Amino acid sequence: MDIKSAYEIAMEKVDKIGDATEDEKLGWKYTPEGEKLAAKYLKENIDLNSEINKYEPKAAKYITEGVANILIHNIVLPKNELMKNNNKKAMEGIKSIKKDKTKTENILNQMRRIFSHYAEQGEQQRKQAYQQVKAAFEMKVQQALEQQGGVPAGAKIDIEKQPQFQEEWRKIMNQLDGQYLKLLEEFKKELAVVK
């Protein structure tokens, strides 16, 4: 009986897979270059299309895929001004490299509506939820202190700095943001398949 090493077994499996196709090889080579190009675009002012056009058409396809992957990945909920600006730049870049401009713009508009809702109604929801959580925690702390004999004279407890309060608030924020993130992820998937 012949016992094979793990290496020999692995090599047999690799041999069974066969040689990579030309397209697979091009994808492995050029997709990461596209990803680097997208990162450069997000940091600097470069013209994505003129950079992509420097490559032969077969390679440009994978460069464009890499760029799109990174730009789409960089679209996030606009929690601050920097994120808003990054979203805007990523969206402009995506719009410039996608061939189906109408479909791309429709999806980007849906994303913008999510962002607008997140900034307006979402902000109100977050403020309201924060006040409710804070009031509930204040009541719990007050009851606990009364059971222990009250608050020492001159002592003041800052509810917002309590780890339990912060943990509860983080959970609620994740729930509130989760609704928006789910929609955003769906649109990002749609955008990824647009030509």
Image (spheres, rainbow, N blue to C red):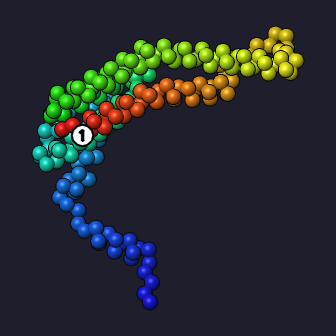
Question: Residue 88 location in percent, x, y?
Answer: 30, 23
Secondary structure at numbered mark 1: helix
Toward the left, the furthest residue is 57
One can see residue 130 in this view: yes
Q: Quadrant of residue 85?
A: top left
Q: Is residue 64 left or right of residue 123?
A: left
User: 131 or 151, which is in the foreground?
Assistant: 131
Query: Which residue type carries mark 1?
Result: Val
What residue is shown at x 24% (from left), y 31% (from top)? 94
Question: Residue 186 location in percent, x, y?
Answer: 34, 34
Q: Is residue 172 left or right of residue 96?
A: right
Question: Residue 121 location in percent, x, y?
Answer: 43, 15
User: 190 or 34, which is in the foreground?
Assistant: 190
What residue is shown at x 27% (from left), y 22% (from top)? 109
Quadrant the N terminus occupies: bottom left
Q: How many marks?
A: 1
What residue is shown at x 73% (from left), y 20% (from top)? 140
Report the residue marked by disc 1: 193
Toward the top, the furthest residue is 154
Q: Quadrant of residue 95?
A: top left
Question: Residue 155 location in percent, x, y?
Answer: 80, 13
Q: Quadrant of residue 18?
A: bottom left
Q: Is residue 144 above or below residue 34?
A: above
